[in-house]
Amino acid sequence: MIGLLQVTHVCLALVCADFNPLLYSSLSQVLLSRFTETSSPVTVLELFLELMTHGQCHSVNNGTISTRDYDAKHWALSQSRVKG
């Protein structure tokens, strides 16, 4: 936390091929939380790579994020105005 004493703003940019706002919102919160805890971009990258390679990542404060919990098709259908 010593390195963050002079930091006033932090920005995180995710560029994704798919549209899954729930997943990337949760992931952004976890990554920013990890950065404020450790003040190291290396630990943020490790967490991101863990999610992308294993499909889930573990965070002490935010629990576990799994890509299986955020199905993009399910989100798209739940937001659709067309009802069957």
Image (cartoon, grey):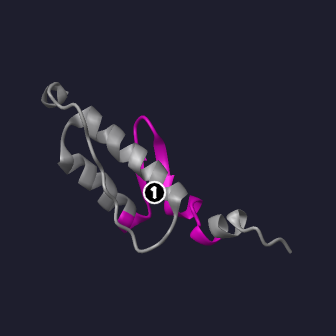
Say whether residue 33 is left or right of residue 10: right
Q: Residue at x 46, y 39 (%)?
A: 62
Q: Residue at x 23, y 36 (%)?
A: 38
Res 83 → quadrant? bottom right
Callout 1 amino acid: Tyr
From the image, tell me which residue sits under label 1: 24
Q: Is residue 54 magenta?
A: yes
Label 1 environment density (alpha carbons within 10 Å; few <14, some 14–19, many ≥20): some
How far from the left and from the top, in percent, is residue 22?
Answer: 54, 55
Q: Residue at x 39, y 60 (%)?
A: 51
Say whether residue 15 is left or right of residue 3: right
Q: Which residues are magenta?
A: 52-73
Q: Secondary structure at mark 1?
A: helix
Say whether residue 34 is left or right of residue 25: left
Q: Residue at x 62, y 72 (%)?
A: 73
How far from the left and from the top, in percent, is residue 37?
Answer: 28, 33
**Which is more toward the observer, 40 or 13?**
13
Q: Is residue 1 magenta?
A: no
Q: Residue furthest front?
A: 81
How far from the left and from the top, in percent, is residue 52?
Answer: 37, 65
Res 78 → quadrant? bottom right
Say whether residue 45 is left or right of residue 15: left
Q: How many marks?
A: 1
Image quadrant in which the N terminus is located: top left
Image vertical order of residue 29 relative to residue 47, above or below? above
**Which is more toward the observer, 70 or 11?**
11
How far from the left and from the top, in percent, is residue 24?
Answer: 45, 57
Q: Residue furthest right?
A: 84
**Which is more toward the observer, 56 or 25?**
25
